[in-house]
Amino acid sequence: DQALIQELLSVLEDAEKDYDNFQKAQKAEQNIQEIIKNMTTASEEDRNDLERALKYYTNLSTAQQAFFHTQLIRRIDQLKKEAEEDHRRKEIHREERRREEARRREEARRREEQRRREEARRRSSSSHISSSHSSHKGHGGRPSGGGATRKF
């Protein structure tokens, strides 16, 4: 019967397509498992690997995704959320560290500026004193020993 043969050929063709889709889904699962096999929890450093793992799934056709284990995609999503949360925590910490460093630099700059002003004030004050009291200088800028000279 020709109609039955056509029906069987159509079913066989569908089965071959399904098997091909199943194999592609299995290959994607293997690749993903290889990426996440050592991840018990995800960190910021795992984000690129998890994105790569997720691409294996998103690159599958809808028919291929039908053969994909949903538990595995949930695991990827969970790990990705953990990695993003870790990234957010670390970004907050890095920002706090940047602010603290900026505050310390500003404080050091202010102390240095204060030190320079005090130094300039001391120099100004000491040059005023020495110029008005010519200490340790005799007449004409020569040292004055207070003793007799050789000229009689």
Image (tube, rainbow, N blue to C red):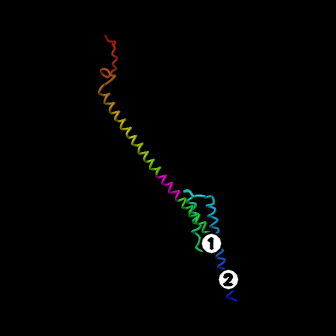
Determine the image quadrant of residue 143.
top left
Numbered label tally: 2
Residue 41's x, y, as percent?
58, 58
Residue 15's x, y, as percent?
66, 78
The magenta stretch spans residue 122: no
Q: What secondary structure do most residues of the magenta stretch adopt?
A: helix
In the image as oriented, which residue stretches furthest toward the bottom?
Answer: 1
Residue at figure coordinates x 46%, y 50% from the top left? 98
In front of the other: 40 or 105: 40
Q: N-terminal of the two: label 1 or label 2?
A: 2
Marker disc for residue 9: 2
In front of the other: 138 or 93: 93
Q: Residues within 10 Å of mark 2 (few under 14, many from 20)?
A: few
Name the quarter where the C terminus is drawn: top left
Q: Which residues are magenta?
A: 85-95
SS under mark 2 = helix
Name the quarter where the N terminus is drawn: bottom right
> In the visual, does 15 lie left or right of 103?
right
Q: Residues within 10 Å of mark 1 (few under 14, many from 20)?
A: some
Residue at figure coordinates x 50%, y 55% from the top left? 89
Determine the image quadrant of residue 117.
top left
> In the visual, does 5 lie left or right of 45?
right
SS under mark 1 = loop
Q: Which residue is mark 1?
A: 67
Three-letter amino acid code of the residue under disc 1: Phe
The magenta stretch spans residue 93: yes
